[in-house]
């Protein structure tokens, strides 16, 4: 019984310290301000902005409730532990189980405290580009897309493919996905960089071992008013959207490609049937990229928002996936590795992300 009391005492100290650091009272005031704004008769005139505000309110309320309820739960368990006698085995067993549950909740919430960057709570835009390796690389890009879609399912993120360019013979050349949910950017920023695959090629008649590369870019979605674009700097092209495998998605030129001439950045959107909707999302994506790049240039911590611009080839990978001659996935930044390649490629990425965020927190 003493062990349970000591454990609960430790959990209580950790929870109270975290609540003090987080300053939940400030969050409560922010909720009041946003709810007051949402009561304005003109609030829903801008649906996108209104939706973003309501999402912030829901996020802050859940954040406050998660910490407050956990703190109260630990206090109640400790009070019960202090009056429980050693002979009351059923109560002790129940206390032990609930103490373990409370510890798991606390560990998860403490982990979220690592996500304190400016955009960590934001939705995100994730893009995958096949690199060196031809058809094998395009197939690898498609494998990564599946891996991330499964990861989103596991973690409760909503996702929508905004643009996809299929390979001529198979796989994908590039794909862009919008990812929504609490801490979407905070989690996925760990994935930006080059991913390297070593395997026996299914496209080689000699069944030889091949190395393929794919580049993953991750940008946070920003509020549109955070960045102004000059129309003179934009080249806007329209084209007919096509789906994965070449099937027609639309019979009109509704897909939009925007090139930012000064930077050379190109973004595309083909998901919506309306050309205007595709254009608006492409502009949103472009603003997110330009804003984060601008902040990189102003910040001494250049890699805080987006990794360095790198090419998808030898010498620049962040993670290596080996399927032959052995099974191993290793993150070259943290040293974390596992032999469960099947699990990782099925979306089990959380340990890699945790290791990256913990290292990033230490290096701040």
Image: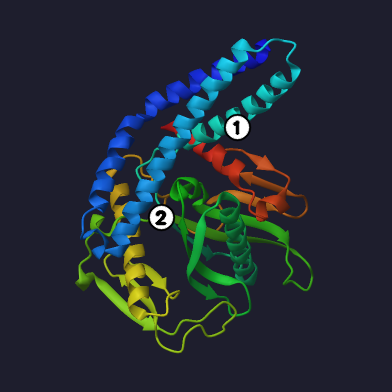
Q: Is residue 359 above or below residue 258?
A: above
Q: Reading the chain from its start, which is encountered first: label 1 or label 2?
A: 1
Q: Position of residue 32 (x, y in %)?
A: 28, 41
Rounded to the nearest angstrom, the CA distance separating label 1 from label 2 is 30 Å
Q: Position of residue 250 (x, y in %)?
A: 47, 85
Asked where in the image residue 346 lies, by quadrant, the reply is bottom right
Badge 2 density bin: few <14, some 14–19, many ≥20, Cα 10 Å: many
Q: Which residue is mark 2?
A: 219
Residue nearest the viewer, comparing 188 with 77: 77
Disc 2 on helix, strand or loop? strand
Among the 4 quarters of the image, the one containing residue 275: bottom left
Badge 1 is on which residue? 104
Q: Quadrant of the C terminus?
A: top left
Residue 151, above or below 255:
above
Q: Is residue 178 above or below residue 78?
A: below
**Picture quadrant of residue 214:** bottom right
- Tell me what residue is drawn at x 59 percent, y 80 percent: 168
Q: Give residue 85's mark.
A: none
Side (left or right) of 220 relative to 11:
left
Residue 325 visible from this viewpoint? yes
């Amino acid at each position: 019984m003493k062990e349970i009391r000591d454990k609960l005492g430790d959990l209580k100290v950790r929870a109270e310290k975290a609540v003090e650091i987080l300053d939940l009272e400030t969050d409560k005031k922010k909720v009041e301000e946003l709810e007051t704004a949402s009561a304005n008769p003109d609030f829903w005139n801008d649906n996108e902005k209104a939706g973003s505000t309501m999402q912030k309110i829901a996020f802050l309320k859940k954040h406050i409730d998660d910490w407050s309820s956990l703190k109260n739960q630990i206090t109640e368990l400790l009070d019960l532990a202090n009056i429980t006698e050693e002979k009351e085995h059923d109560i002790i067993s129940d206390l032990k189980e609930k103490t373990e549950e409370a510890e798991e909740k606390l560990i998860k919430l403490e982990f979220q405290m690592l996500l304190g960057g400016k955009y960590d709570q934001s939705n995100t835009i994730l893009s995958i580009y096949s690199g060196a390796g031809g058809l094998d690389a395009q197939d690898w890009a498609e494998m990564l897309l599946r891996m991330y879609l499964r990861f989103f399912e596991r973690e409760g993120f909503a996702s929508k493919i905004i643009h996809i360019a299929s390979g001529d013979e198979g796989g994908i050349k590039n794909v862009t996905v919008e990812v929504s949910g609490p801490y979407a950017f905070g989690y996925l920023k760990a994935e930006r960089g080059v991913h390297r695959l070593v395997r026996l090629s299914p496209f080689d008649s000699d069944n030889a071992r091949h190395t393929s590369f794919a580049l993953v870019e991750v940008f946070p979605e920003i509020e549109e008013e955070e960045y102004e674009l000059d129309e003179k700097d934009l080249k806007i092209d329209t084209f007919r959207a096509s789906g994965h495998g070449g099937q027609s998605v639309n019979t009109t030129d509704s897909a939009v490609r925007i090139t930012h001439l000064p930077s050379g950045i190109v973004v595309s959107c083909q998901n919506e049937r309306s050309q205007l909707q595709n254009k608006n999302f492409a502009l949103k994506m472009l603003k997110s990229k330009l804003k984060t790049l601008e902040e990189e240039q102003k910040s001494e911590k250049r890699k805080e928002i987006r990794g360095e611009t790198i090419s998808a080839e030898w010498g620049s990978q962040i993670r290596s996936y080996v399927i032959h001659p052995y099974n191993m996935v290793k993150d070259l930044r943290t040293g974390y590795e596992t032999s469960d390649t099947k699990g990782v490629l099925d979306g089990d990425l959380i340990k890699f992300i945790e290791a990256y965020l913990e290292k990033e927190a230490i290096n701040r």
